[in-house]
Amino acid sequence: MQQLTPEGQRLVAELASRHGFSVDAVTHLLFAVRNGNGTMAQFGHPEFGGGGQWMRGGMIMLGDMFNHALKGRVDALCSEIADVLARQPGPLQTGSFQSQSQGGSGYQTQAAGGFAGQSSLFVPDPLMHWWPAQLGSPSATGSQNQVKYAYFANIRRLAVDTGGECWVYDTQDHQIGGFSQQQGYGSSITFTSQYGTVNLASLPVVSRGPSVG
């Protein structure tokens, strides 16, 4: 599990003291709210009545469903965590790719959006930043099957990880909005931009090497 920085640990201790929960419980909820991009959280902890779900705006479900006082406390804690994360430069997702599989039944997942910067609350996870460091922070990230993408719109670069190898492409004047993969024989990766559907192989390759982490 990703670790907290000293600042993150201080925040958790402060929230735990103010809301009357343990440090372990608040840490669990901090990651749950972050994973829900600051708008929702799915959690499971004895201090919160077991499993539960929170959505910003007042919707909250707890295993201890009739404990309205606990619901109010958990809702207040989740809301404060969400407010703190929204003020941080990096923990919440800022963009994501639309991706789909065309033909075949290949397994696909849509990864979380890109990060706007490094949060002071969380120790960086090297596995989440597999692209060359000089590219900076991506506008959006995504994944499909065994391929990962990171798009850097401000410098017109696209990093693609296939099997632990990172290819960096010059996106030229394309404004990329999504990816798809053709399965089976002659499989290829295409992306969509203001020019329609374009084959990834048509972009100039800037660099190629092993992925970081």
Image: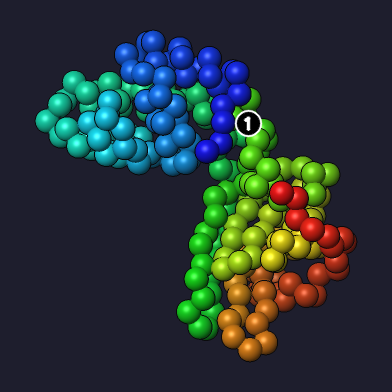
| Rendered location of residue 201, percent (x, y) | 78, 75
Would residue 88 be visible to someone looking at this image? no
Which residue is found at the position 52% from the left and 29% from the top?
86
Q: Nearer the viewer, residue 21 or 154?
A: 21
- Residue 76: quadrant of the picture: top left
Q: Nearer the viewer, residue 99 or 209?
A: 209
Q: On the picture, is 183 further left or further right than 81?
A: right
| Rendered location of residue 186, percent (x, y) | 67, 87
Q: Which residue is situated farthest in the left direction here?
A: 66
Report the label total. 1
Q: On the picture, is 159 further left or further right than 32?
A: right
| Rendered location of residue 19, percent (x, y) | 34, 15
Q: On the picture, is 167 further left or further right than 59?
A: right
Q: Amino acid at mark 1?
A: Val
- Residue 173: quadrant of the picture: bottom right
Q: Secondary structure at mark 1?
A: loop
- Residue 64: quadrant of the picture: top left
Vertical order, 17 against 85 (above or below): above
Vertical order, 130 against 109 (above or below): above
Which residue is found at the position 37% from the left and 25% from the top?
25
Instruction: Identify the residue position indicated by label 1 in the image.
Output: 123
Q: On the picture, is 48 further left or further right than 40?
A: left
| Rendered location of residue 53, percent (x, y) | 30, 39
Colour style of the rendered protein structure: rainbow
Vertical order, 85 against 6 (above or below): below
Which residue is found at the position 56% from the left and 27% from the top?
4
